[in-house]
Image: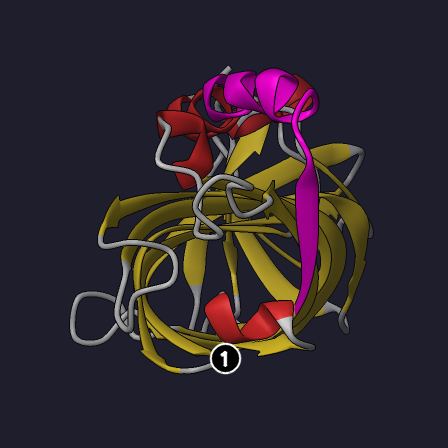
């Protein structure tokens, strides 16, 4: 299991205690744009909808809970991620294709995935104007849409193989090189900039996979992301 899924699972531990306390839910709509910039010129865009759960305001004070548990918010959602690699990249073979590689021409991929999220309030009260949060979200399972791409492989005998290959369609989070399909994740800092509106800066990690001749080939991409979330309903004013 890799670092990011492990962080996510460990962060879920306080959820067991949260389940024993009164909670409130918030519906959140989200948009995000990511770019590899000069380091690696690829880009992504994502839209998502989340259902977030957190503790109810304290009945004694009428304000938010001051316990450490009161700083956690959890959510599940549905995210659509569009990714474009822009040019050719080397993809590493996995499983039966371990030790092999393909050069794959960049082509757009769109993934629709169920996702999970956890957020921790670092600074400020939940009902203050500008609380600062540390959060993490990750795709769990879904499907990838996209056309075939041109791939080349240099065999041991020096012969160049050229073929049209398809992206792996079924997405499933299994951890690092075991991941299937196209999966998005973010580690982020967010700040409420207005009632209902939160801005975040994130580091995104996107896994992409192609199938060729019975083998699976994978590459990870890292991007800087700017995102905005909008809370719906009365509770959304304090997201």
Comparing 234 with 118, the one in front is: 234
Q: Quadrant of residue 89?
A: bottom left
Residue 80 seen by the camera: no
What residue is rendered at 51% in x and 14% in y? 1
What residue is rendered at 28% in x and 61% in y? 131
Residue 185 is left or right of residue 188, and the answer is right
Comparing 166 with 146, the one in front is: 146
Check the image and report above or below for 85 versus 134: below
Which element is circle 1 on? Answer: loop
Check the image and report above or below for 229 versus 2: below
Q: Is residue 102 magenta?
A: no
What residue is rendered at 68% in x and 50% in y? 24
Residue 1 is left or right of residue 165, and the answer is left
What residue is rendered at 44% in x and 52% in y? 63
Residue 136 seen by the camera: yes
Furthest residue toward front: 60
Mark 1 Cα shell of 10 Å, populated few (<14), some (14-19), many (≥20): some
Comparing 147 with 120, the one in front is: 120
The tally of labels here is 1
Q: Which residues are magenta?
A: 9-27
Residue 15's x, y, as percent?
60, 24
Q: Which residue is mark 1?
A: 196
Q: Is residue 12 magenta?
A: yes
Residue 75's x, y, as percent?
64, 47
Residue 133 is left or right of residue 166, and the answer is left
Comparing 206 with 77, the one in front is: 77
Residue 69's x, y, as percent?
44, 28
């Amino acid at each position: 299991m890799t670092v990011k899924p492990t962080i996510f699972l460990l962060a879920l531990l306080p959820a067991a205690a949260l389940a024993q306390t009164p909670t409130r839910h918030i519906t959140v709509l989200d948009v995000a744009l990511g770019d590899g910039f000069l380091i690696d010129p690829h880009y992504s865009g994502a839209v998502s909808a989340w259902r977030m759960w957190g503790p109810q305001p304290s009945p004694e004070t009428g304000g938010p809970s001051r316990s450490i548990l009161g700083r956690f918010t959890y959510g599940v959602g549905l995210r659509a991620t569009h990714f474009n690699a822009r040019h050719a990249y080397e993809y590493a073979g996995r499983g039966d294709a371990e030790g092999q590689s393909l050069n794959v021409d960049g082509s757009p991929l769109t993934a629709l995935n169920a996702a999970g999220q956890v957020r921790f309030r670092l600074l400020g009260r939940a009902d203050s104007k500008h609380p600062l949060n540390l959060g993490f979200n990750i795709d769990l399972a879904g499907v990838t849409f996209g056309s075939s791409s041109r791939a080349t492989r240099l065999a041991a005998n020096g012969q160049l193989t050229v073929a049209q290959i398809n992206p792996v369609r079924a997405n499933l989070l299994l951890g690092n090189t075991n991941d299937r399909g196209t999966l998005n994740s973010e580690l982020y800092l967010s700040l409420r900039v207005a009632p209902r509106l939160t801005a975040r800066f994130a580091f995104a990690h996107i896994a992409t996979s192609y199938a060729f001749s019975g083998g699976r080939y994978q590459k990870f991409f890292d991007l800087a992301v700017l995102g905005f979330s909008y809370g719906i309903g009365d509770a959304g004013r304090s997201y």
